[in-house]
């Protein structure tokens, strides 16, 4: 090789080495944080809240039903720690108007929304409804009814987020346009989940997570939030999982406006240790280059678009009036909720 060719080869090699990889741009410009699933534990301050700070999160997902044990004061603490987007999530399969209002307003979470106009809040309605056995037509009906019944809570910093099931067919039904309109007409954002054995973008093709996300991206023009993301393989080190997740975020389309890792939980929670954020994982997340020195300076995410929503055949008699059997159904939903997490793990593994 002559001197000129060697010089060219050196230039090319330097360019390749200095070119930023996916991790170098991962999560740039969008909120990145965690799903906190055990706020009622006695290790909130020294473990769960500490891990959120350690990963330098600026978006948090927080369950508001009483069974999770969380409090409005903990939302205030997450805001103090840098959260500038907060997702308040309803019960998985009991998100009828009265229950949602009771959890959101009655338990004091809406007062935090009122006190913090500088923070973007969402109410995420439902969570993996197919896993807890909810009929997708019922889920669609309740999403529409709850949104309409709670319009008095609308505020500039409070958006409505419809959470998608893990089943493509169920998601098609929930997003379908019927004679009473469409979820995409009245909601401000859509929530999806992303899980894989080893990677999460693209996800292994034996799961439907990616199909559900693609459906949302093609059938609506609303902002999309990944409210759960995780890698299953127990043998993969946690810091490597963090890097793969950041690499995945770097490849996601611009419509995705926030990502929350599943999950931060109580140290005694042994249900899904392969997913839970530990110190090594938090440190790897904290090394992402886009972390603001002051999270409060991050602008609020955009809300509405004008969604072209997919049409789907109407189920005969699916929506002739208000829901029936609410109390009994709610009680069954409570019983089902306690079994839901173990069912979901079987579905993922």
Image: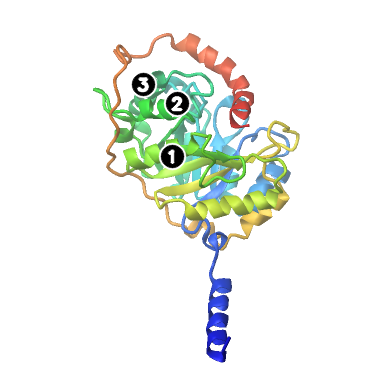
Residue position for label 2: 101
For residue 296, above or below residue 194: below
Q: Are marks 2 and 1 in contact (CB under 8 Å)?
A: no
Q: Quadrant of the C terminus?
A: top right
Q: Residues within 10 Å of mark 1 (few under 14, many from 20)?
A: many
Say whether residue 261 is left or right of residue 93: right
Mark 1 or mark 2, which is nearer the start of the sequence?
Answer: 2
User: Element at badge 2?
Assistant: helix
Q: Residues within 10 Å of mark 2 (few under 14, many from 20)?
A: some
| Percent coordinates x, y for residue 293 in the rendering | 56, 63
Mark 1 or mark 3, which is nearer the start of the sequence?
Answer: 3
Q: Which mark is residue 332?
A: none
The part of the image, by quadrant, that contains residue 169 is top left
Between the residue at mark 3 and the residue at mark 1, the CA separation in whole angstroms equals: 21 Å
Mark 3 or mark 2, which is nearer the start of the sequence?
Answer: 2
Between the residue at mark 2 and the residue at mark 1, the CA separation in whole angstroms equals: 28 Å
Camera-side mark, 2 or 3? 3
Between the residue at mark 2 and the residue at mark 3, the CA separation in whole angstroms equals: 17 Å
Q: Are marks 3 and 1 in contact (CB under 8 Å)?
A: no
Question: Looking at this view, is 142 or 68 the one in front?
Answer: 142
User: Element at badge 3?
Assistant: helix
Camera-side mark, 2 or 1? 1
Q: Residue furthest front?
A: 1
Question: Looking at this view, is 7 or 322 the one in front?
Answer: 7
Residue position for label 3: 141
Question: Looking at this view, is 294 or 337 the one in front?
Answer: 337
Q: Quadrant of the N terminus?
A: bottom right
**Quick check: can you spot residue 50?**
yes
Which residue does the image show at 32% across and 38% down from the upper left?
219
| Percent coordinates x, y for residue 160 in the rendering | 39, 36
Residue position for label 1: 213
Question: Looking at this view, is 144 or 343 the one in front?
Answer: 343
């Amino acid at each position: 090789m002559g001197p000129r060719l060697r010089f060219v080869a050196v230039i090319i090699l330097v360019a390749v080495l200095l070119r930023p990889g996916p991790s170098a741009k991962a999560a740039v410009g969008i909120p990145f944080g965690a799903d906190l699933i055990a706020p009622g534990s006695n290790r909130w301050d020294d473990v769960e809240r500490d891990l959120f700070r350690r990963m330098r999160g600026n978006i948090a997902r927080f369950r508001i039903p009483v069974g999770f044990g969380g409090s409005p004061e903990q939302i205030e603490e997450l805001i103090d720690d840098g959260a500038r987007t907060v997702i308040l999530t309803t019960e998985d399969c009991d998100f009828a108007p009265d229950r949602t209002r009771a959890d959101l307003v009655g338990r004091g979470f809406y007062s935090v929304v009122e006190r913090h106009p500088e923070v973007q809040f969402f109410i995420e309605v439902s969570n993996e409804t197919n896993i807890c056995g909810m009929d997708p037509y019922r889920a669609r009906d309740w999403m529409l009814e709850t949104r309409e019944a709670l319009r008095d809570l609308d505020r500039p910093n409070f958006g409505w987020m419809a959470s998608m099931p893990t089943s493509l067919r169920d998601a098609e039904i929930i997003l379908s346009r019927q004679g009473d309109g469409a979820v995409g007409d009245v909601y401000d954002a859509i929530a999806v989940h992303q899980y894989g054995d080893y990677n999460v973008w693209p996800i292994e093709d034996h799961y439907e997570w990616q199909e559900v996300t693609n459906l949302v991206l093609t059938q609506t023009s609303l902002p999309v939030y990944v409210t759960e993301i995780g890698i299953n393989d127990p043998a993969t080190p946690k810091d490597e999982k963090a890097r793969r997740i950041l690499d995945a975020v770097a490849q996601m389309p611009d419509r995705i406006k926030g990502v929350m890792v599943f999950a931060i939980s109580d140290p005694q929670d042994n249900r899904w240790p392969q997913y839970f954020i530990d110190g090594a994982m938090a440190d790897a997340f904290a090394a992402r280059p886009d972390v603001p020195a002051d999270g409060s300076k991050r602008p609020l995410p955009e809300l509405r678009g004008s969604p072209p929503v997919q049409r789907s055949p109407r189920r005969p008699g699916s929506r002739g009036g208000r829901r029936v059997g609410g109390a009994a159904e709610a009680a069954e939903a409570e019983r089902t909720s306690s079994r839901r997490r173990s069912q979901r793990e079987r579905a993922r593994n």
